[in-house]
Image: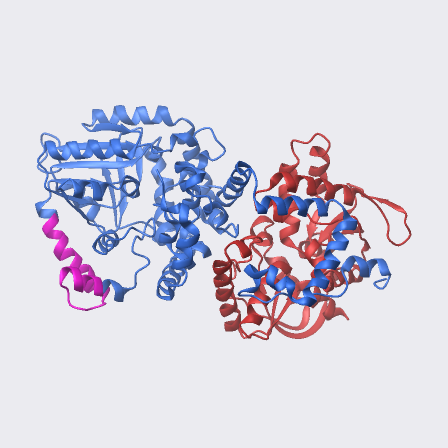
Amino acid sequence: MELESKHFKSLYKEQIKNQQLRSNLSKATLQAVDKRAESFEEVDFSFLRDEAKKIKQESITHLNEFLSQFEDMAQKNGCKIFYAQTPEKANAYILDAALKHGVRTIVKSKSMVTEEMELVPFLTRNGIDTVETDLGEYIVQLANEKPSHITTPAIHKSRKEIAELFHEKIGSDLNTDPKFLTTEARRVLREKFLSADMGISGANFLIAETGDVVIVENEGNARLSTSAVKVHVVVTGIEKVIPQFSDLRIFMRLLARSSTGQKLTSYVSLIRGPRAKEEKDGPQEVHIVLLDNGRSGLLGTEYQDVLHCIRCGACLNVCPVYRNIGGHAYGSVYPGPIGSLVTPLYYGEKNAPDLPFASSLCGNCTEVCPVGIDIHHHLLALRQEITSSKKSSLEKFLFRNYRKTMLRPGRYKMMGKAARLLSKTGLLRILMKSWTNERDLPEFPSISFRELFKSGRLD
Amino acid sequence: MRIFLFVPCFIDQLFPNVAVSTLKVLRHLGCDVVFPANQTCCGQPAYNSGYADEARLMAMHEVNAFLKFNSAVDNKTIEFDLKNDYVVGPSGSCVAMIRNFYPQLLSDDSRFNEISQKFSSRVFEFTEFIDKVIGIEKFSGKLNALVSYHDSCHALRELGIKQEPRDILKRINGLRLVELPYNEVCCGFGGTFSVKFPEISTAMANEKLKNFEETRADILVSSDTSCLMHLQGRARRSGMKHRFAHIAEIMAESIS
């Protein structure tokens, strides 16, 4: 499979020209950064992070055991489990379930895994009306775009742009008031909820001990799309399993704070199977589709902790690169720092040869990661893998010569002098045009420190 | 206290005044400073660009250059005492390369494995050295200036330096420090990142410079010259006249 992320360089150059986009992103992400910081003032972030990391390490190290424990429990609770190695297999299973029940309309809540599968276009192509019910996802679906952020899919859009979109697509008045816009979306979506036969959701956590599916959200749309339908399909990655119910006490304190700066989201749903005999409501069937799609390839490698990710989006919000180019520039389902890891690791380096380099390695992502993923050092390690897989390149040649110069202090001194002389001619400006196109070079001194030191003038 | 002065290559070649100022301040604080003349580049540009093998060779060269050299002054052989001597450099970024990354880069080499661990632990960034080893109370100065401080990401996150430079600046009479909004956000330099993705790099510089202008300070001070080179280059191109100075330069001026 070939991904758009291959063309990151041309994608980001387009996006960065968009001033409106950058202003939208800057406002939204910096606000998220501030709110996150504030929300962690009252709890001990590093303690919670270390605990969360321990739990995730345990889960991922023994992934197979916890998955099969989850499977046993979920089946006892009446759920049907399906493991899908690839998106195609997952899509086919879901379509099959939909056809079996004669499903015409599906309400869907947020799930990045379904983005990996391109599930919505797939179902739509197969004649099933599939509607995103998360407000951000709904906006993105109306605009015929893809989410540009893991937790806030329409972060790239301003209120004005959303109002125009609603005006055009669902006939709303041109009004930028968020309350109005939300009510408008609700007006359309209520109808869909009432007519839907199937609901599709993601999952934030799967609990091995109890077989519970945990969904964290703010709009209540996930709860509706999982309870007011005949059939509920959970779609998630195999890495979402955690050992015990009590582990939630750590993640519940971390996830919302990292993501939106809330202490807790408005809704936390714990789903334990379909409607029981004595119950009056709830779905008649619950299917749980567990997608691999490259994940198990990370097990046992130095990148295993990438599977700890709880998709909070904190690393995107703090990332100054993301803030300036937006999620669509990455050409991948997962943008930002975690996306620059996940994309080459799931889909192969050839699909994302530039992403690991598109970081100043500032380390802010690693600092805020609630599960302790060493994001920026992993990017560095991936850079090494990518350069060593190349037989030859101009850059390789330059670094080899750079090293040769640095191993010989005499040659280093001579080259330094030459560069300083060259700076007087203007030639250096031309040679360094990736620097000088938008920045001045410093004024080069006539003498280096070592020459000064040797001359005795500093004594 | 004997110090082996670590002068990163681009400071040596392009910003000698930063090294001169570092030397001056350390001497002023009573240190005996020697300069290992065979040092060149710590290897960070290669390492961060994905060329670990090239970086490893440079790391070996650099460790050797510090462990033993002939003095430029009297040609006497000077050996690094791993128990008592220190390496001090005016760059959080290059110090992080030696202290944090040399041990793992050289861990597979039987000749360098042990020595690089010991050596790396003796390497300090200039402001943290003054704070942790010399004692900050030994320093005081006088300079009328309104400054803002830029944290380099490597000093901040790889080395955990945040308060040290601020505490030092507070000991300069007449100097007023105004904090930058979002002072923990990267300036966009990032080594070869700055030329591989120049549009992103300069967009990040623009944000930093906008925040700097908001402080109304005259000088942007940092402990990393690479960030300053990038920010100053962008500032000059946009017509900003502010001064960009390494903290060692400000300290040296404050004691003269």
Image quadrant occupied by the N terminus of chain A: top left
Above or below: residue B128 compared with residue A333: below
Residue B251: quarter of image: bottom right
Q: Is residue A434 left or right of residue A148?
A: right
Q: Position of residue B242 (x, y in %)?
A: 59, 73
Give the colour chain B carries in the figure. Answer: red
Viewer can see residue B15:
no
* Residue under the point 86% across and 50% down: B71
Viewer can see residue A428:
yes
Q: Position of residue B92 (x, y in %)?
A: 63, 53
Extent of the magenta region? A164-192
Q: Nearer the viewer, residue A39 or A70?
A: A70
Residue A440: quarter of image: bottom right
Q: Is residue A337 left or right of residue B151?
A: left
* Residue under the point 36% across and 36% down: A247
B173 within the magenta span: no
A175 within the magenta span: yes
Q: How many marks?
A: 0
Give the colour chain A carries in the figure. Answer: blue
Q: Nearer the viewer, residue A365 or B231?
A: B231
Q: Position of residue A198 (x, y in %)?
A: 14, 39
* Residue under the point 75% across and 59% down: A417
Q: Position of residue B1 (x, y in %)?
A: 81, 51
Q: Main secondary structure of the magenta part?
A: helix
In this figure, which colouring scheme has been used for the structure? by chain
Above or below: residue A43 compared with residue A447: above
Q: Nearer the viewer, residue A290 or B229?
A: B229
Image quadrant occupied by the C terminus of chain A: bottom right
Above or below: residue A312 compared with residue A59: below
